[in-house]
Image: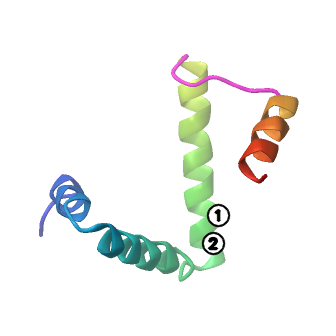
Amino acid sequence: MPDLGEILKGALSLKLGDRAALAEKLLASLDELDEEEADRLWAEEAQKRLKAYREGRAASVTAQELAQKAERLFR
């Protein structure tokens, strides 16, 4: 079985429409997770982000900054 790097390289070489279709199918497959698995994955992600923040590899933003960015994105 090919490793993730090989799969990603192949996926990125696809035409735009094919990449979009692949992305849509991959995202839809995440909806198939049961609630327990989704909670476990979100907890793992939260731990990774907290570790990155504590190690200085990620920055924080204020709620106001986040709200302003969201407003810009959704205009």
Which residue is at a point 56% across and 48% down the rendered structure image?
Answer: 45
Q: Which residue lies furthest to the front in this view?
A: 75
Mark 2 element type? helix
Mark 1 element type? helix
Q: In this view, does 72 lie to the left or right of 32?
A: right
Numbered-mark total? 2
For the residues bearing labels 2 and 1, Cβ distance under 8 angstroms: yes
Q: Quadrant of residue 70?
A: top right
Q: In which quarter of the image is the N terminus?
A: bottom left
Q: Where is residue 55 in the image (x, y as percent from the top left)?
A: 53, 18
Q: Residue furthest right?
A: 64
User: What residue is pinned by disc 1?
Assistant: 39
Q: Give the range drawn in magenta.
A: 56-62
Vertical arrangement, residue 3 with respect to residue 61, above or below: below
User: What residue is pinned by disc 2?
Assistant: 36
Q: Which amino acid does label 1 sit on?
A: Asp
Q: Position of residue 25 (x, y in %)?
A: 42, 79
